[in-house]
Image: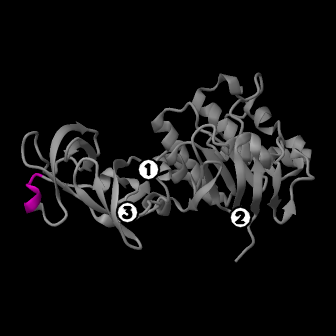
Amino acid sequence: MDAPLLRFEGVRKSAAGLQDISFDLARGETLALLAPAGAGKSMLLRLLAGTERPDAGRMLLAGRDLAPLAAPRRGLSAFEPGMPPRRTLQEAVGQPLPGFDIAARDRPARIARALTALGLDGLEGRRADQLGPLPQLRAAFARALAPEQPILLLDDPFAGLDPAPRRALAFELRRLFRARGLTVLLATREGEEAMALADRIAVLEEGSIAQCAAPRALYEEPATAFIAGLLGENNRLPGTVEWREESECGIRLDCGPLVEARVADAGGPGSRCIVAIRPDRVAVAALPAEEMGEGALPAALRDTVFLGDHVRLLLELGEGGMLVARRPPGSRMPVPGGPASVAWDPYAAFAYRALR
């Protein structure tokens, strides 16, 4: 196996609440650091870039300790959303290149490659501040690409964009990163963005990396309730563990029913927990529970919302337990006041310790 291009070893920064941060980044890989605002993910990028210094630990690029190196000598290029005023696109995109000791004769080709990659070729002579918000953002990405450094750093790069262009640009950049074999470290608070762009996602929780895995593995088997909540919608049903085996347990929900789930980080019998199940894993039938089959629970439909590609159903479970399910448009669904039941595969439900 090839050695990682970048390695964090026990990096600590007490002022940002970061403790013992360790991870690898392979050449050609995109790794997303996922966490809410204020969790320290931006600080990790600043530590790597050299604008902040860690209290302890090492950061190695191709086996070389970055600590003695000044920021411009570290082989990193960072995305900055703002563009210099009164500059043409060619001037703005080329502005960082002298700081990377790129010879003047090589700069026009790098600028041209970066502009073409972001669909801005032909606009070289336009002033950056005369462009709309989306072309300006594209120009900022081109500016980050132009130095062609070993690692590209992206800190919340789509901030301020509406959801539709944000999603479209994320998929476009995903194709670009893979086509060029770029190595990217992304800091984001958006789970969907992390899944769209990254080969792996490292989730920061309480100052350390709680789980690092491919997007699908992280989505389907989140190690904690916090991680499950960062990656898509979850039903969270509080209850108490009644029995526990190696990987399975039974939980008496506060709303009444006894259900089974996989053990994540829940405790033993008598401990409080949360059962998490994603809305797309909940089966819904317009039938009494005994007719739906084994494991089905009686429910009552309280609301439906049509959202285009799916219908969102809000169902009451037991005494006051609320559960969200998703169904394709046109499928048979319960009606308010009519029979309804829900079921899910216990393998798709996780029992987590109750959140503090």
Which residue shows up at 81% across the image and 60% down it? 61
Q: Residue 221: horizontal and vertical position, in percent?
A: 45, 62
- The percent coordinates of residue 25 (x first, y second) are 69, 61
Mark 2 / mark 1, whichever is N-terminal:
2
Q: Left or right of 46: which side holds 299?
A: left
User: What residue type is disc 1 on?
Assistant: Ala
| Secondary element type, mark 3 | loop
Q: Is residue 320 depicted above or below 180 in this figure?
A: above
Circle 2 is placed at which residue position?
A: 27
Task: Please report the residue visible at 24 percent of the width from the left and 58 percent of the height from the top.
Answer: 258
Residue type at mark 3: give it.
Pro
Residue 149 in sight in this render: yes
Tag 1: Cα neighbours inside 10 Å, few (<14), some, or many (≥20)? many
User: Residue 80 placed where, x, y %?
Assistant: 72, 36
Which amino acid, by three-letter code, is at mark 2?
Arg
Do the residues bearing badges 1 and 3 touch, measured as CB atoms within 8 Å? no
**Label 3 sits on residue:** 269
Residue drawn at (77%, 26%), measured in percent from left and top? 87
Q: Secondary structure at mark 1?
A: loop
N-terminal of the two: label 3 or label 2? 2
Please tell me whether residue 212 is drawn above or below residue 274 in the rendered image: below
Magenta highlight range:
286-291
